[in-house]
Image (cartoon, helix red, strand yellow):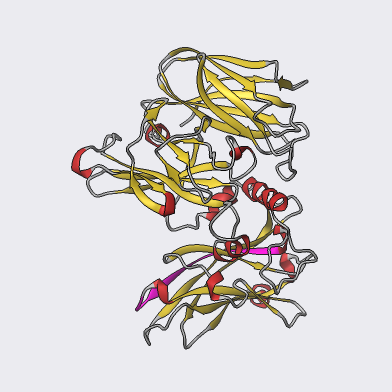
Amino acid sequence: MECYVTSCSFTDQPFLLEQDKEFVLKFNLDYPGEVVLDLVASVPEGDWGTKGKESAFVTIYLNEEYNQDLILFYGAENFSYQRLLGRLDAGQHVVRLTFQKDKSSPNIKCISIKKAEIRQVRDTDPEIIFYKYAPIIYGRNLSDDYESVYTDTPLALYYYCDQHENLSMTVEYQIIFSHEDDGTPGPALMSRWGRTTDIEWVYRVKLDKYGKRIQGSEKVEEFQGPEHMTTNFKGKYALGEHPILQAATKNGNVSDHITSSYRFLLKPTLCHSRDVNREEVMNLHPWTYRVSAKEIQRQQNLEYPVNPQTPHLADKRFYLYIHSSKQSFNGEHKYGSAGFKVKLRNHHTWYSSTHDNHSFAYDGADGPFATTVKLPEGTKIGDIEEIVAYYVEFQSAPADYYIQVNGIRSAFLLNEEYLPKRPFIISKNVAILSPQQREVSLWRADDLESGT
C-alpha cells in the first residue's frame, strides 16, 4: 500500500517551471522502501496531436544525483504523472526537477505544476515486490537522440503475477506504448488488436516464496528482445534492484544493451488477470485512447470522409471497440479465428472487423482478444441493431475443428474527447464457429429491449 509522505500544492497560481528555474521538494522517510513521485502538471500550449508541441522534457534529480526523466505528453490539461524514484533509506531526501527546453518539443517553453506528492511503499509491505523489480526503461534513440519525446512514448506499466505450487511466483511487466512506428500497419492494428497502442511484455522475473530473485538453475530473468525473442537478462540494476533495459526497436521490443541517455521508471499501476483482455488495462486508464488517437492524427493521413467498407485508417471515434475471448477445439488456433460484423438499425449493410481479409484477423493464441469495426460517421451505440461473430479461415482444418467465442466482454465507442463512452454493449452468449457454421449472432438490440 502506498503511504502518504508529503505534498506541495499550488492552489492559487501554479508553479511555472521554466528553463532558468527548478522545482525542489524535500521530504523525510521514517522507513526504507520504494518511493513514488506523483506530479500533477500541464504543458501550456502543449498538444500531443500537433507537430512541434508534442511534449515537455523534465529531468528528475534525487539527492543531487540523476534519477530519471519525465515526458509530459498530456498537453495543456492537468495530468497526474506517477513515477517511481527507486528504493530509499529512512531519512531526509530532496527531489529536484528541471525543465529541459532543448530536449522538449520546439514550441514548448515551460510546464505548469499544480501539485507534487511523495508516497512510499515500505520494505515491510507485501506489495513491495511488485514495485522493487519494475524495470527502468531507457528511451529510444533510433531516429534521433530523444525520439520518445514525440513518438512511441511509454504510457503505463502493469504486471501479471503467476503463482506456482512451491509458493514461488513469476512476475511479468508489460508496457503500453503510445504507438508502434514499425511492425503491423495501422489498419491491421485496429482489426487484429483493436488499438494502435503497442502493448508488450518487457521483463519477467521468478521469485522465491520470500520475494527474492531465484538464482541458480531455476533462475528466470528475461526480457522480450528484438524480433520478439525471449532473451536472458544479463544487464545491470539501478535505483535499488530495478533492472535496466532500453526501448530498442520501433515495435516495443527492448534490450539490456544501453545506448541512450534518458530513462524512465514507471510505477506499476495494477496486477492484471490473464483471463481478461490486455486492452481492459486501457479502459482502466482511458486517457491512453486519447493519447494514441492524437499520435495517429499527427502521423497518419486519416481517411475522410470515412468509408466503413474500406480498411483505411480513420478517426478513432468512427470505430466500435470489441473485447472478447475465444478457444479452439480439436485443433490449434492456426487453423482459424473469429471476426465480428455489425448491422445498424434501418440499414441493410454489414460492417466487418476484417474487411473480408483474413490477414487482418486476430492470429494470436487462444484467450482474450480485441478488435474494432469501422462504422459510418455519427454512429451512436443505440444505432447498433446486431453483432455477429463469424469464422475466419486461415488454412484447411480438421473436420471436427471449431472455435468457441465467449460472448462480448465489452463493446463501446469513443466520445468527442477520444475516451470510452458508456453505455457499453455486453453479452454472455456463446458462439460456436466452424467451417460448417460460419456465423452466429452474439447480441441483438431487440433481445435487450424485450428483456430476453
Magenta stretch contains residue 328: yes
In this picture, is 103 found above or below 279?
Answer: above
In this view of the protein, can residue 452 be seen by the observer? no
Q: Where residue 387 sits in the image (x, y, percent)?
A: 62, 74
By secondary structure, the bulk of the magenta-drawn segment is best described as: strand
Q: Quadrant of the C terminus?
A: bottom right
Identity of the residue furthest to the left in this view: 217
In this picture, is 361 found above or below 64?
Answer: below
Identify the residue at image location x=69%, y=72%.
310
Q: Where residue 86 sits in the image (x, y, percent)?
A: 45, 26
Identify the residue at image location x=48%, y=72%.
405
Identify the residue at image location x=27%, y=49%.
164
Q: Which residues are magenta?
A: 319-331
Identity of the residue furthest to the front in this view: 143
> Could you tell whether 83 is left or right of 257 in the image?
right
Question: Which quadrant of the figure has residue 235?
Answer: top left
Question: Which quadrant of the figure has residue 336?
Answer: bottom left
* Depth check, front residue: 293 or 328: 293
Q: Where residue 29 sits in the image (x, y, percent)?
A: 46, 16
In this picture, is 315 found above or below 329?
Answer: above
Magenta stretch contains residue 70: no
In this view of the protein, can residue 116 be seen by the observer? yes
